[in-house]
Amino acid sequence: MKTEKRIAVVPGSYDPVTFGHIDIITRAAGLFDEVVVAIVNQSVRKSTAMFSVEERTTFIEDALAEAGVTNARVEPFYELVVSFTRRIGAHVIVKGLRQASDFEYEMQMGHLNRQQAPDIESVFVMASPKYAFLSSSWVKELARFDGKIDGLVPGPVVTALTERNAEFRDQD
């Protein structure tokens, strides 16, 4: 009897990827045969991304390689997450939860996704306590004002944020 490969999608903007994201992806990789880190090319509810899809892809691939995650791949997507999930043969969407407000938002999104695609399950993974406060938005704001971001994002992201913010300051 052949069993179907268990594939999960971990969607997000990852602008930029944080160690909180890497934690959720790594833990999902321990639960599923394959994890597809799905990068939202252009989010409707968020502002324009600071980093291109190509940059975000590289940041994630490098961080996952450093973390020793071998059963994950990164792909951008340009459609509804349930359409992407179905297209690649997955049946699960994994989302990380940091606090109650995440749960409320993700529960609504999960219900909408279920209405669109009843065959796709949403699975919620609680953030590790050391990352429960961490968001890409906060990291970008810290970096913008020369705050300490080491330990919050991978080294290449620290470098890229430092360089990008130096460009912004030069324009002021």
Image (spheres, rainbow, N blue to C red):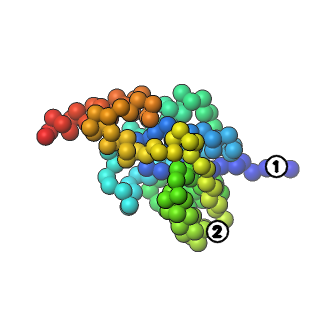
Q: Residue at x 60, y 38 (%)?
A: 26
Three-letter amino acid code at disc 1? Lys
Q: Nearer the viewer, residue 138 or 37?
A: 138
Percent position (x, y) of residue 43? 39, 57
Structural distance between the alpha carbons of marks 1 and 2:
24 Å
Q: Residue at x 20, y 39 (%)?
A: 168
Three-letter amino acid code at disc 2? Pro
Percent position (x, y) of residue 46? 36, 56
* Res. 163 image quadrant: top left
Task: Give the number of the mark in front: 1 or 2.
Answer: 2
Q: Look at the image and tell me in which quarter the C terminus lies.
A: top left
> Under tag 1, what secondary structure?
loop
Tag 2 residue? 118
Kindly check if marks 1 and 2 are in contact, taking CB atoms under 8 A apart as contact.
Answer: no
Q: In the picture provided, is 84 more to the left or to the right than 14?
A: right
Q: Indicate which disc residue 74 carries.
A: none
Q: Residue at x 56, y 46 (%)?
A: 127
Percent position (x, y) of residue 42? 38, 55
